[in-house]
């Protein structure tokens, strides 16, 4: 179970400053069982990460409670 006070999965990334990107290369940030697409940039922008986290939670059927503290 993941509990998050934000309204949407990935909002902790989505709501940060516009130019934020991961500071290490894409190959070191893969999630278990579902790697990032090969066409993605080496340094992933925050909105792409946020959308991926939302997709990943749905695809992996992660029990995720939003708007909860």
Image (spheres, rainbow, N blue to C red):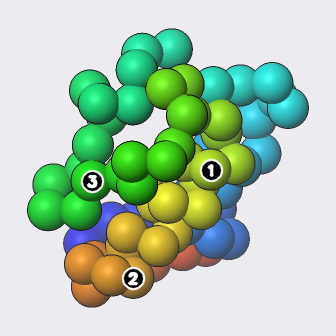
Q: Which dot, 3 or 2, sits closer to the camera?
A: 3
Q: Which residue shows up at 37% across the image and 69% down it?
A: 56
Q: Which residue shows up at 55% across the image and 34% down it?
A: 41
Q: Quadrant of residue 57?
A: bottom left
As drawn, the residue found furthest toward the front would be: 39
Name the residue nearer the viewer: 2 or 55.
55
Q: Quadrant of residue 43?
A: top right
Disc 1 crowd rating (10 Å Cα; few below 14, some 14-19, many 20+) is some
Whole-percent x, y for residue 7 in the image = 68, 71
Name the residue nearer the viewer: 62 or 22.
22
Q: CA distance from mark 3 to mark 1?
A: 14 Å
Residue 35: numbered disc:
3
Disc 3 crowd rating (10 Å Cα; few below 14, some 14-19, many 20+) is few
Query: To which residue does mark 2 refer?
Result: 58
Q: Which residue shows up at 27% across the image and 85% down it?
A: 61
Q: CA distance from mark 2 to mark 1?
A: 15 Å
Compared across the picture, whether 56 is left or right of 28 comes to right
Element at label 3: loop
Residue 2: numbered disc:
none
Residue 48: numbered disc:
1
Q: CA distance from mark 3 to mark 2?
A: 15 Å
Which image quarter is the N terminus in? bottom left
């Amino acid at each position: 179970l993941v509990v998050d006070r934000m309204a949407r999965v990935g909002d902790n990334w989505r709501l940060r400053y516009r130019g934020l990107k991961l500071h290490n290369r894409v190959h070191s940030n893969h999630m278990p069982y579902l790697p990032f697409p090969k066409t993605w940039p080496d340094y992933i922008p925050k909105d792409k990460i946020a959308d991926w986290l939302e997709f990943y939670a749905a695809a992996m059927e992660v029990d995720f409670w939003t708007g909860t503290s």
